[in-house]
Every structure is written in structure tokens, then in C-alpha cells.
Image (spheres, helix red, strand yellow):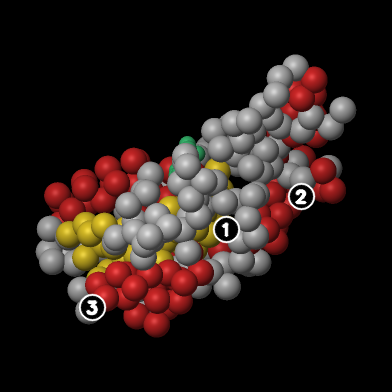
Amino acid sequence: METPGCAEVVHLDNAGAALPPAVVTDTVMAHLRAEALHGGYRAAAEAAPRLAMVRASIAALLNADSRDIALADSATRAWQAVFYALPFEPGDRILTCRAEYASNVIAYLQVAERTGARVEVVGDDADGQLDVKDLRRRIDERVRLIAITHVPTQGGLINPAEEVGKIAEDAGVPFLLDACQSAGQLDLDVERLCCDALSAPGRKYLRGPRGTGFLYVRPRLRERLKPAVLDLHSATWTAPNQYQVQETAQMFETWESNVAAVLGRVSKDHV
Ligand SMILES: Cc1ncc(COP(=O)(O)O)c(C=O)c1O
């Protein structure tokens, strides 16, 4: 049976954490065994080609380039990596949706408190989706970010991400899309969605292991961002008083990671 858990339960919680197929669990366990036998560094070195495929498979899922994908240990970490790298000043406006994820709202409020930026919630239309007319009305030169959740945690709502992306693109405002419930469930093409950044977890509709997530960041946005935190993986220490930030989305990653869980994101065709 492809998904052993299906023999045990009727599982309707993919929006929380899906049952992984056997290939995911087998991949994770095989790597943990390799770590136990050869040590974590050698096991990671031996898995390097497959680790590169993880990034490539996420890029293919999103119609993006591998260099624009950062691996993270959760969708929230991925989202935060880009959000906390955006510069805000007093009076700047952040536009979001009513059905936003609580962690994202907390981050907006914290950054608003620190910087004097304002958070505004765009209204809903008669169907409960973000009202694109209201969004269009609110655009002005002080809008610095449009950030919404595509498919909220509960309720089955699908926000009109493509239309929001077009409005953001026309206004020259970065568009950050939380694709937690849409990744693996809806077709996501970052070009069609016109999104500058997108975050998602591994464990929901992609049926990967827990403790995995990823971030897409468009190069033109990345060039303007300064990651809030850096380490020797996201940057290189080039001289006693100098460092160089990575040019790819690796600038949002950290060196240490759960390699077994990351490998679990590789699809069956790759193992
Ligand atoms: C819309 C949305 N955003 C973000 C998250 C957070 O994802 P993670 O727990 O991987 O950080 C969730 C998780 O339920 C979610 O539903």
C-alpha cells in the first residue's frame, strides 16, 4: 500500500499534516540509518545529488528556478525570512486579507510597532474572498507590501491570488503569498501568480515530513532585501571585517538542518 496509514485511519486532515506515503518515511529512515552508520556529515555528502533534487523538485512545482528556492524548517520560518527582510518606514502601508494566518498577523503587528508602518485589512467580497476592487482602491505610493494567504487553514476559501498578483505587479508593490494549503493542492505557477515571494510547508498537501518548508523569492525582490539573520551558509566571511551575502535564495537558509527530513521531500521518481 502506497500510504500505510490509510490501513489504520480515515485521515481527513491534510490541511494540518497529511499521511506520508511509504517512500517518504523510507527515505527519511534510510538517511537516519546512514547518519548512524557513517556520521551526519558523510551521510549528507553522500546524499548531495539527492539534496540538490529537492530544490529542483520544488522549483519545478512552482515553475521557478532552483536558485530562487530556499529550504526552511517550516512554512512560518520561510515566510518570516522574507517578511523580516523587507524595509519599512513610518507611514508605510502593509495590505493583507481578512482570512490571514495568525502568525503572519503577529509579525505584521510587531513590525508595525517597531517601524511605524500601518497594517490594513482589505475587505471581502460577497463570496468571502478578498475583494479585488477594494484592494485596487487602496493602492497608493505608500503601499510597501501586499501579503495574503491563498487558502486559509480552515473553511475552504480560495483567495484570488492571481488577480492580487496582477494588481501588485501593476503597482510595483512586492506580493508575498502564503501558499500553505494550496501547495500540492492547487496548481502554483509563480509567473502566472505574479508573486515575488511564496512560502509553503512540506507536511500538508505535499505529504512530506514535518519540520520542512520552503520559500520562493523572485530575484528582483531578493536584490533589494537584507536578511534579518545571517550565518556562514547564507553569507561568507570574506575578510576580518567583511562578509558577502549569498546571491541566491540560499541567503535565507541556515547551515544546520534535518537532512533526513529534507530528503523526505524528494518525490518517488527521484529516489
Ligand atoms: C495559512 C497557513 N499559513 C502558515 C501556516 C504555518 O505553517 P508551519 O506550521 O509549517 O509553519 C499554516 C499551518 O497550518 C497555515 O495554515
| Ligand 1 is within 8 Å of the C-beta of the residue at disc 2 | no
Going from N to C along the chain, the mark reached first, 1 or 3, is 1
Query: Residue under circle 3?
Result: 140
Q: Is residue 120 left or right of residue 164?
A: left
Label 3 crowd (10 A; few <14 / some 14-19 / many >=20): few
Q: CA distance from mark 1 to mark 3?
A: 30 Å
Q: Is residue 146 left or right of residue 52?
A: left
Q: Which of label 2 and label 1 is nearer to you?
A: 1
Tell me the amino acid under the disc marked 2. Answer: Pro
Q: Secondary structure at mark 1?
A: strand
Going from N to C along the chain, the mark reached first, 2 or 1, is 2
Q: Secondary structure at mark 3?
A: loop
Q: Which of label 2 and label 3 is nearer to you?
A: 3
Tell me the amino acid under the disc marked 1. Answer: Ile
Q: Is residue 139 left or right of residue 229?
A: left
- Is 266 in front, or is 94? 94
Label 1 crowd (10 A; few <14 / some 14-19 / many >=20): many
Label 2 crowd (10 A; few <14 / some 14-19 / many >=20): few
Query: Residue under circle 2?
Result: 49
Tell me the amino acid under the disc marked 3. Answer: Asp
Query: Residue under circle 1?
Result: 69
| Contact (Cβ within 8 Å) of mark 1 with mark 3 | no
At 31% from the left and 66% from the top, the residue drawn is: 145
